[in-house]
Amino acid sequence: MKIEICLESIESIVSAEQGGADRVEFCSDLFEGGLTPSLGAFKVAKRKSNITIHVMIRPRGGDFCYSDLEFEAMKEEIRLFKEAGADGIVFGILSEDGEIDVLRSSQLIALARPMSVTFHRAFDMTKDAKRSLETLIELGVDRLLTSGLEPTVMDGMETLKALVKQAGDRIIVMPGCGITERNFSYVHQQIQAKEYHVFLPGTQDSKMSYRPDHIYMGGMLRQAEFSISHTDVSRVEIIVGSKENA
């Protein structure tokens, strides 16, 4: 069994490795659900850690139906991260009618090889889980990140069980969204997946002593300006320990 940690900073990558995680999914802007991180941050992370790093390839938040320009950007990002030594990419592209975009997906997969390829939770916005899974298998995707077409893994439990059974050894079905150190053992007992995707943040207080409280750098849905989120080593250690006993 493997544990993948979803994160958005170099410090979090180091923490995930210290906690015993098997792999990380490196993103930026998790407030948007995860976007492509900067190439500079990735290069520093590679120098400062030895953990397997899969990189999110997602040009913006919102839906997964991309313009021609956005698709060109995705291809260029794959080329750059491949050249920089990424171990894998994570992406998802849908057509307007809620199906896997086979043509564009096949182009990105071909461009990414020999890196590992994960199709992310864009899958959960498709019409039919069984049909979409078979499409990904035909495309040759290595793994699928999914919450079972529901908001969280706990909500999509029955669908996830069915997907794991349907997949067999043809593709890895990796449950993710809403898994914590408190419910991990139960989730694994029910689903019996080979890999799990978890987000385990901790909060670190800002070093700033001068703190004007009337200025914000984000939009109307404001996160605390002087509170910084990083992966919590102790939470990773708990899940890894649970994995060993599963």
Image (cartoon, rainbow, N blue to C red):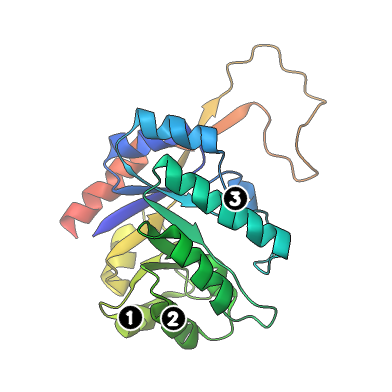
Task: Name the mark on residue 20.
Answer: none
> Measured from the top left, where is residue 43 in percent x and y?
45, 33
Q: Considering the image in quadrants, where does the N terminus appear?
A: bottom left
- Which residue corresponds to mark 3? 35
Say which residue appears at 44% left-offset and 59% top-offset. Answer: 112
75 relative to 60 in the view: left or right: left
- Which residue corresponds to mark 2? 133
Residue flagged by tag 1: what amino acid is it? Ala
Question: In terms of image quadrants, where is residue 69?
Answer: bottom right
Say which residue appears at 27% left-offset and 56% top-offset. Answer: 2
Say which residue appears at 35% left-offset and 58% top-offset. Answer: 114
226 relative to 25 in the view: left or right: right
Query: Could you classify mark 2 by the number of other residues whose Cα lies within 10 Å: few (under 14), some (14-19), or many (20 or more)?
Result: many
Residue flagged by tag 3: what amino acid is it? Leu
Q: Considering the image in quadrants, where does the C terminus appear?
A: bottom left
Say which residue appears at 42% left-offset and 84% top-offset. Answer: 134
Label 1: which secondary element: helix
Query: Could you classify mark 3 by the number of other residues whose Cα lies within 10 Å: few (under 14), some (14-19), or many (20 or more)?
Result: many
Query: Could you classify mark 1 by the number of other residues whose Cα lies within 10 Å: few (under 14), some (14-19), or many (20 or more)?
Result: some
* Distance from Cα at disc 3 to Cα at disc 2: 23 Å
In this view, 241 is above or below 190:
above
Residue flagged by tag 2: what amino acid is it? Leu
> Measured from the top left, where is residue 82 in percent x and y?
44, 48
- Which residue corresponds to mark 1? 167
* Distance from Cα at disc 3 to Cα at disc 1: 27 Å
* Distance from Cα at disc 1 to Cα at disc 2: 8 Å
Question: In terms of image quadrants, where is residue 50?
Answer: top left
* Pointer 1 with pointer 2, Cβ within 8 A: yes
- Work out whether mark 3 precedes mark 1 in sequence or the reverse, and give the earlier one: 3
> Measured from the top left, where is residue 108 in percent x and y?
51, 64
- In depth, the one of 78 and 55 nearer the eye is 78
- In depth, the one of 192 and 21 nearer the eye is 21
